Image (cartoon, grey):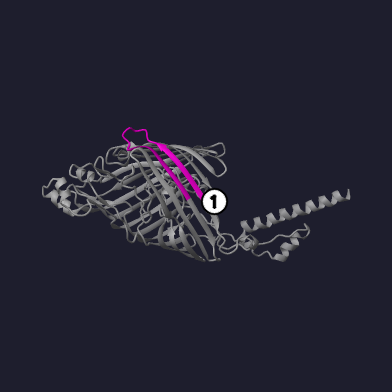
Amino acid sequence: MKNKKIIRSNAKAKLTTLLTSCAVVSLYIATPAQAQNISKPAIDALLADGGGQVKIYTFPENNAQTSSNPASASANVNNQEQNKPVQNIEPASGNGQSFSFGQSITAEEPGVTDSEETPMMPPEEDKKPCCEPDLSAKFELKGGYLPDSDSRSDFTGYAKTSLSATGQINDNLDFKASLDIDHIQETGGHDFSETDVRYDENYLRYKNGNFSTTLGAQRVIWGRVDDIKPTDQLGPQDLRTFITNDYEERRMAVPALRSEYTMGDYKLDGLFVADLRQALPDQDSLWSFIDKDNGKILGVKTDPALTPLIQNATIDDDVSGIGGGGIRFSKTGDSADWAVTAQRARRNTPFYAVNPQILSAIQAGTPPAAALAGASGKTLEARYDWGWVMGGDIAIPIGSTILRAEGAWITDVPLHTTALNKTEADMAHIVAGAEFYPGDGDLRIIAQAAAVIYPDADNVIERTETYSINGTIHNEFDQGRWNAELDYAAGLNRKDIYLNPKISYKGLNSHELFVEYHFFDGNEETAGGFYKNNSALMLGWKYQL
């Protein structure tokens, strides 16, 4: 009986210690200013009757800012890397991630976030030894069937392995090293395969108070709307399989120097991109921007003078040189998040200029075949011209709804005249939309409208006005094990349709199984029309260690 009393006494003491510890920590979190005035002897005395001890760790005064707004809270849920802060209102998503044709990415810091805030320091005994890295690996495998009889291939496959290591050298310096190994396969009718080993994020980052600078290959995303980001002109996408991969997978790291300085809710961000990195579809791939079989270029209307040149073209698509640079000034807060930016950047997608010798001969009346035979050099040259980008973005929470808008004025965009000469025009690109939750359940809807306008462009073969809608409809079932999603985009003034329904199962620990369909259709000068023979039913698997 005496032993039972001793056991009850010890259990009571431990329970008292636990509850008292929780109370002290809760007091600190709720009222940090008052909690800092509590002395350690007072705390020890408070715990003395319970027979226990509690360790008190120092909290930084400027810890991560929070928002009582439900919409802000919903945008802060899923951070993709440990010990990295999130911002209040960022790219469109129901769980803090920007969804683009089926996947997500948050972020502006290399890897993940837009804002730099000081995380709570872990206990000394929990800290890893200097330079001991966290290792991770991701695997993806998917294959698809192309049912259209006019498709160049019957089957397509994609495999990818991503390896990464992150670590901290000291309190001010951390690093990341990562690479991707992938393989693309197309078979049936026309065979094509490509295997690449490519660097991903590889950087050193120095932090000191409100200042940080990052040197190396890094993924930086500027902009706030879903998928179509007019102000994000300094970061390319991997378009080797067009948009059949998730946006997170398409987004590429670029060799750059980035410096960030935060002043409360304000942040000044500067970026210099040292190399113009591109990953375009191979000329033999069914996703190539140039269709030699039919004499077409993606986004350009069929032209009788241009068609024979494309069908017999040799193409210079080498890319090199500086990628550009820019600054962004942003503010986060409960009522709204906003940013303004100015950039000097090169185009992320190529403009195909016709060889001047061939062009002069055709304009003089020489038949295209003779003009091709009499010219030296490549038929078409891929160019990535410079332009100024000036714009901004804003996000406003209203209840559980987030309104977002983003726009940019981009100068010196290259276009083809009806005589196939190169000309330039300024472009206005505007996107606005909302993210909301009908019924306050798991159903999430993102709906946006976009406009691309060249106000002063005349006598060109490209489209001078494009109006469209796009978005995502997402729902979860069985406590998140099953996910159903539809990504969509449709032209308003031209038929241009993309639909991507997807069902995935995530109930196997770190595994994900999914089935999806990519549907394309539209007029010939649109992306949907250009790739209408490439609609594909795909099965896939993902796994993360």
Q: Main secondary structure of the magenta part?
A: strand
- Name the residue rendered at 38%, 57% in the picture: 340
Magenta span includes 326: no
The residue stretch that appears in magenta: 137-161
Question: On the image, which quarter does residue 150 sit in?
Answer: top left
Compare residues 409 and 488 and report the one nearer the observer. 488
- Name the residue rendered at 23%, 45% in the picture: 310
Question: On the image, which quarter does residue 154 sit in?
Answer: top left
Magenta span includes 147: yes
Give, as a three-letter code, the residue at label 1: Ser
Residue 10 place in picture, x, y as percent: 80, 53
- Give the vertical position of 122 relative to 441 (above or below): below
Residue 535 visible? The answer is yes
Residue 209 place in picture, x, y as percent: 52, 66
Instruction: Determine the secondary structure under disc 1.
Output: loop
Residue 379 place in picture, x, y as percent: 22, 51
Residue at the far right in the pictured view: 1
Compare residues 148 and 43 and report the one nearer the observer. 148
Residue 180 place in picture, x, y as percent: 45, 52
Residue 66 visible? The answer is no
- Give the vertical position of 242 relative to 260 (above or below): above
Q: Which residue is mark 1?
A: 68
